[in-house]
Amino acid sequence: MSKTSSEQQDQLNQLRSIIIGKKEPRQMVSDVVVEALHDREKKDGSVNRILQPIVEESVRHSVTHHSDRLVSSLYPLMGNLVRKYVTAFLADFLEKTNQLIENSLTIKGLKWRIKARQSGMGFAQYVASRTFVFRVEHVFLIHRETGLLLNAVDLHPAGDGSSNADLISSMLSAINDFVGDSFFENEDGLREQLQSVSTDNFKLLIKPGPSAIIVAAVTGNPSQHVSDQLQLTLEEVHSLYSDDLSSYEGDNKAFIATDNILRDCLLTKQREDGNSSSGAYAKGKKRKMPWFSIAIVFALLGLFIYKSVESYQESKLATRLMALDELPGVIVKTIEVNDKQDINIDVFRDPDAFSVEQWLIDRSFQPEHFNIRERLIVSKDPLLNRTKALRVLEAFPSIEVTWQSDQLILLGQIDFYQRQSLFEQLSSIGYVEGKNLIHRLAPPINVNELTDDPSVQQALFSNLVGRISAIQLNFPISQSELSPDLKETLAELYIHISQLNSIASTLNLDFGLIIMGTSDSSGNKTVNDKLSLKRANNAADYLHSLGLNKQNIYVTGLGQIDINTVKNTSRKVLFNVIHVRKNNKGQ
């Protein structure tokens, strides 16, 4: 007979009560899940490996998709934490800065630097040892049986010091074993144990326990409070980690969380007497003023102001002296102002330039305070060149001098030989004919004053005509421009024409100058014809620039000269004078 559904349900309820009791499944799971997770994690660490990726993915998803909620939740907490951290950091920074300033700028600070160097300590470490009554720098937790380091904390952690801590742990264990093996047992039958070890820089306080040893590295003279704190911390470690210490086989993971417990041992007591170098106030006493430091600061400030004013004055004096460089023909190389009584001046100077010493006197300087070194140069300064040119022209009073920009213009009368000497002197200065020298110089000799005999005058006239006809200008191949030498020849020709003009007037003659350009037989005949004419025109233009009237000049180009003996050297300009007697109808 089949059972009804109500009977089946009753049977299931009875079976469930037999297996799991009267509690609900959720309540049973909640009672055991925490313990189960703890046991599993302690057994093989698998809970952390399983939960870590899940938690990380959950946090990443929350930050990515719900960052506004995360920020809203963390904002009140993070703001408070940031403010507290910044306040603590600034307070610590100001205190350390104050200590370093006070300890560095005092006689005591200088002595401490010497003592720190002699003891092989850093200055900051030595200051700390003198500033504090004591300070716990390092705390080590060591497994007693194996001597292995379980954990360590530092007052100022810097980098990974685990290797050094392991070395210290091994050495302490070896020393402790040596003491225990080498000396007698105490009254209770226990082996002797080290209580402290002193070094140049630290004092090591050692507190042994049944399963672990705690060691503190202290600078200064630790009080009993340090020893008591070490004992309390050691008892707390044994209470919380008793099973882990008993079953320890070299894995320190279980002791990572002892950091907070060990940090309770990092105690510090600052000096509070009147000799404290940390700048703390003694009870009932005023803070000492660092008069020595203040005096040094004011002395350095005064020295800085003095040097600044002195440097400014020297710079201002050097700037005034640099005006020497503006003198024509003077180039300043260096000016060294050691002080107002010792000034070195090194210059390049043209002999015709203004005297440096006189320049200093004119500006109220004392020449005896200056060491002047002059090296002579030839300056091409335009202003100085004018002075030199005027000095040269003082020997030629018949010449009128004018200036057009940088060009020198000479007008007047001078004989040929004086003219040659004048041009050589001007050329050495830098005034060259055709470049920056223009002249309208005529010979001063009036041949009419030499003789009144017409036959002599006629002979002189013929002689000058012969000289003019003998003058030839020779040109390079394919060239028509006048070189300086050709211009010099034309200037000599102009002097002859000027003399000829004076004699012709006495002899009642009219004359003209024929200028003929030629070319050689090489090249194109048409080109040569043009080239010969251009040579003649260039000569005529230059004579006109010297003062010869164009109405008395006739210019022609003869072209090629086809004479076998001279055809290759006939690149010339030739001159010829034609003259006729005047027709005086009034006589």
Image: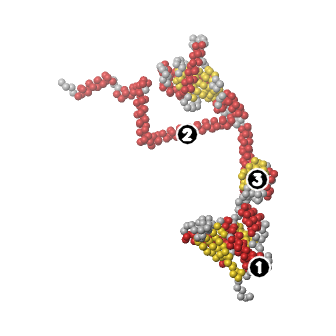
Question: Residue 16: horizontal and vertical position, in percent?
Answer: 30, 25
Q: Secondary structure at mark 3?
A: strand
Question: Residue 197: horizontal and vertical position, in percent?
Answer: 62, 21
Residue 393 to residue 7: above or below: below
Q: CA distance from mark 2 to mark 3?
A: 71 Å
Q: CA distance from mark 1 to mark 2?
A: 127 Å
Q: Which residue is mark 3?
A: 374
| Neighbours of disc 1 within 10 Å: few (<14), some (14-19), many (20+) | few
Closest to the camera, between mark 3 and mark 1, is 1
* Upstream in sequence: badge 3 or badge 1: 3
Q: Which residue corresponds to the image point at 61% horizontal and 20% vertical from the top-left?
A: 196
Q: Which residue is mark 2?
A: 83
Q: Which three-letter amino acid code belongs to the residue tagged 3?
A: Glu
Q: Secondary structure at mark 2?
A: helix
Q: Quadrant of residue 295?
A: top right
Q: Which three-letter amino acid code belongs to the residue tagged 1?
A: Ser
Taking the image as shown, residue 586 lies to the left or right of residue 568, namely: right
Question: Residue 154: horizontal and vertical position, in percent?
Answer: 57, 29
